[in-house]
Amino acid sequence: MAALDTNVLVRFLIQDDVRQGFQARQLVDAALTRGETLFIPITVLLELEWVLRSNFEFPKDQIIVAISSLLSAKELVFESEATAEVALELFRQSKADFADCIHIALAHAAGHGPLWTFDKAASRVQGASLIK
């Protein structure tokens, strides 16, 4: 199974570069036609949120919709997919950054918790605790 980098997912979603957007769409469509899946590392998902937020100024609700649609795509398989889904839900329900939600969800999935933090917003997420 081949894997995708963040820039391919960005082109696939945003279509801001006509040539690369077309190539990204072709790659995903070809995998789907062959009955194959494409792998997305958790770090790519983390970087994707950052790019959508910082480079394209997506608001939180649009980021949630974009990531949710990718997570439900049958042609994509995510590293720690269940954990990514938990992180997305934590992100939806809190004021914490997506990165913090991923850290919390990964620590919990590994059986380690709480995630100790100095970040007040992150500490309000279930599974994290504030160092006072």
Image (tube, helix red, strand yellow):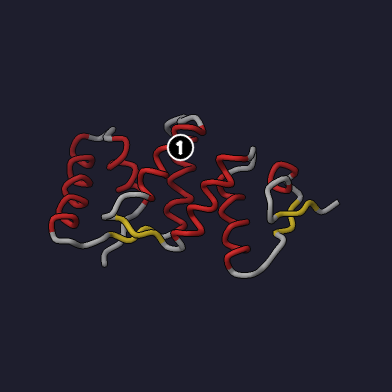
Which residue is farthest right? 132
Q: Residue at x 17, y 61 (%)?
A: 35
> How many marks on residues?
1
Q: Quadrant of the N terminus?
A: bottom left
Which residue is farthest bottom? 111
The quarter holding residue 106 reads bottom right
Foreground: 26 or 5?
Answer: 26
Kind of residue sitting beneath label 1:
Ile
Vertical relation: 121 (above or below) 108: above
Label 1 Cα neighbours within 10 Å, binned few <14 / some 14-19 / many ≥20:
many
Residue 132 x/y as whole percent: 86, 51
Vertical relation: 93 (above or below) 105: above
Q: Secondary structure at mark 1?
A: helix
Q: Is residue 78 left or right of residue 22?
A: right
Residue that label 1 marks: 63
Vertical relation: 18 (above or below) 106: above
Foreground: 27 or 37?
Answer: 37
Q: Is residue 116 left or right of residue 16?
A: right
Q: Is residue 107 left or right of residue 3?
A: right
Q: Residue at x 31, y 50 (%)?
A: 73
Residue 87 x/y as whole percent: 54, 51
Q: Residue at x 63, y 40 (%)?
A: 94
Foreground: 46 or 70?
Answer: 70
Residue 115 x/y as whole percent: 70, 59
Residue 78 x/y as whole percent: 39, 59
Foreground: 50 or 125?
Answer: 125
Q: Residue at x 75, y 43 (%)?
A: 120
